[in-house]
Image (tube, grey):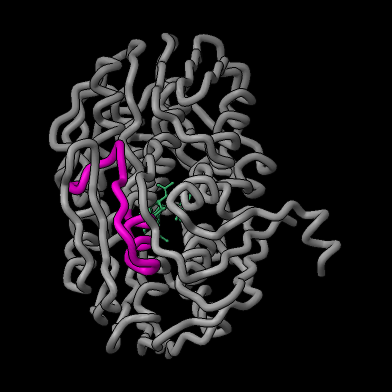
């Protein structure tokens, strides 16, 4: 398996282009199933998860042509409304085909995605929401079987007991083709929700309130084609901001917007990092002084995102002072802690909180990536560590970071990817 090797101690200087958001592109791709007319996306990132969604949609019969960041999708003819286990198990976001399939074809069978390293991650809210829109939902042999009696969902009131990004997206897509009005209450407010609403609206849907906690959707008998640019990846933006914060230096993150990372930016400012809007993007800078320890709690948007928690923890390991980090979204999202500890970090975990006492410097070590954001947090730690850090199992990174090594190297980081054969030979 490939490895990433980082030698720390070099400040970052230059520009880093931010790609389109994985977590926006995945539901946008699923939305192509809602229409028999072509849907074109631009600014689609080149990631393993996008390849997984492409395979899944092709298996349903969607024609997909990709040229760089441009992706043309045509779901005029669908061969199958079954999303099989082998494709779904690779990526939890596969469950996002459920709403569109049942809304357009009156039925779907989608493998249950199962848990993953960061938590149990049930899909009960997705299923409950679909029943609120009139679907009959059963679980058979590991598959969700959903049917719309009479072939069409009907508008309804869906109240989420707590905020779920994926359930909000699935229900928005389902409601867009349901008969009558639907209201989603306690909906997620993430920028990816607003981005999906933009595409659905361009396809002819009538949606009000996306980006707030109450979304009204007037269902249409059919939707048309559209073209849409994927919003910038706020998690990639925040990750590189934290890379600059931990390595020091002065970098402009281009093709992105500070408003997407408000909560994270505020937290970083309190730690002593400069973040400001400049022409073309966001300038991030940190001088000689170590960052300050700052407490942080993850929350649904507009709070501090759970997908930046691991990266922020890496930063706090080398802060002056201490930081209490509380994870409120996923029950098992501290798997980077033992790996950071191998590099000399001082972290104590108690239930959902981690007390991080800053140390002057980390030391390079062999570490193991356990999930996407944990993996990148180890690369960030490596940027600040003395000597070499070797990160194993980096295939997780390919799910969510396009050309991580290239983007960091271009700013002066000493980081490289070692192909599996060489890594094995050197072990
Ligand atoms: C592809 C994508 O966009 N992934 C993001 C999405 O995941 P995802 O959409 O899966 O996350 P959710 O917002 O649904 O999950 C939030 C919490 O709700 C729980 N839950 C969710 C649905 C459900 O039916 N029942 C239930 O109990 C989850 O286990 C979790 O504890 O939002 C997460 C929270 O911001 C991010 O970390 C993920 O990167
Ligand atoms: C948890 C993540 O993604 P997913 O929901 O696709 O597992 C993530 O992007 O950090």
Quarter occupied by residue 77: top right
Report the front residue among 245 and 263. 245
Q: Is residue 44 left or right of residue 368?
A: left
Residue at the spot 52% in from the left edge and 35% down from the top edge: 46
Q: Is residue 46 left or right of residue 425?
A: left
Instruction: Decide if residue 159 is in sight here.
Output: no
Report the front residue among 304 and 32. 304
**Residue range of the region highlighted in magenta in the rendering:** 238-259
Taking 144 as reference, is 29 above or below it? Answer: above
Instruction: Decide if residue 196 is in sight here.
Output: yes
Taking 410 as reference, is 422 above or below it? Answer: below
Residue at the spot 35% in from the left edge and 31% down from the top edge: 230
Quadrant housing the N terminus: bottom right
Residue at the spot 66% in from the left edge and 43% down from the top edge: 85
247 in the magenta segment: yes
Percent position (x, y) of residue 354? Answer: 38, 84
Report the front residue among 146 and 322. 322
Taking 253 as reference, is 299 above or below it? Answer: below
Count of picture labels: 0
Percent position (x, y) of residue 20? Answer: 38, 36
Quadrant housing the C terminus: bottom right
Residue lying farthest right? 425
Taking 123 as reference, is 290 above or below it? Answer: below
Residue at the spot 47% in from the left edge and 35% down from the top edge: 45
Percent position (x, y) of residue 199? Answer: 30, 24
Report the front residue among 306 and 216. 306
Q: Is residue 93 left or right of residue 126?
A: right
326 in the magenta segment: no
Percent position (x, y) of residue 127? Answer: 42, 46
């Amino acid at each position: 398996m490939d490895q990433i090797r980082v030698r720390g101690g070099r400040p970052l200087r230059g520009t880093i282009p931010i790609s389109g958001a994985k977590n926006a592109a995945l539901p946008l791709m699923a939305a192509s199933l809602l229409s028999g007319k072509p849907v074109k996306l631009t600014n689609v990132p080149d990631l393993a998860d996008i390849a997984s969604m492409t395979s899944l949609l092709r298996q349903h019969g969607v024609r997909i042509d990709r040229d760089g960041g441009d992706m043309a999708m045509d779901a005029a003819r669908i061969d199958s409304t079954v999303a099989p286990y082998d494709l779904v198990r690779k990526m939890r976001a596969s469950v996002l085909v459920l709403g569109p399939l049942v809304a357009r074809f009156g039925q779907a069978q989608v493998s249950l995605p199962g848990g993953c390293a960061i938590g149990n991650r049930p899909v009960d809210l997705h299923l409950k929401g679909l029943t609120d829109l009139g679907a009959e939902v059963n679980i058979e042999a590991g598959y969700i079987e959903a049917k719309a009696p009479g072939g069409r969902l009907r508008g309804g009131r869906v109240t989420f007991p707590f905020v779920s990004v994926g359930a909000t997206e699935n229900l928005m897509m389902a409601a867009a083709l349901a008969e009558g009005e639907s209201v989603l209450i306690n909906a997620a407010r993430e920028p990816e929700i607003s981005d999906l609403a933009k595409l659905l609206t361009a396809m002819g849907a009538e949606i009000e309130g996306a980006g707030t906690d109450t979304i009204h959707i007037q269902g249409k008998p059919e939707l048309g084609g559209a073209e849409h640019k994927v919003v910038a990846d706020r998690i990639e933006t925040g990750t590189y901001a934290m890379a600059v914060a931990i390595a020091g230096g002065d970098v402009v993150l281009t093709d992105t917007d500070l408003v997407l990372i408000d909560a994270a930016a505020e937290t970083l400012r309190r730690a002593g990092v400069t973040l400001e809007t400049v022409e073309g993007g966001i300038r991030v800078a940190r001088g000689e002084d170590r960052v300050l320890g700052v407490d942080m709690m993850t929350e649904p948007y507009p709070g501090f995102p759970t997908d930046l928690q691991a990266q922020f923890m890496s930063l706090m390991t080398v802060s002056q002072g201490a930081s209490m980090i509380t994870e409120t979204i996923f029950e098992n999202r501290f798997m980077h802690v033992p790996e950071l500890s191998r590099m000399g970090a001082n972290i104590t975990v108690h239930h959902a909180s981690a007390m991080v006492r800053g140390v002057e410097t980390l030391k390079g070590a062999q570490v193991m990536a356990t999930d996407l954001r944990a993996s990148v947090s180890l690369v960030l730690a490596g940027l600040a560590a003395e000597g070499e850090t070797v990160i194993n199992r980096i295939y997780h990174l390919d799910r969510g970071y396009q050309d991580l090594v290239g983007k960091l190297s271009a700013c002066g980081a000493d980081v490289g990817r070692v192909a599996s054969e060489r890594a094995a030979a050197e072990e």
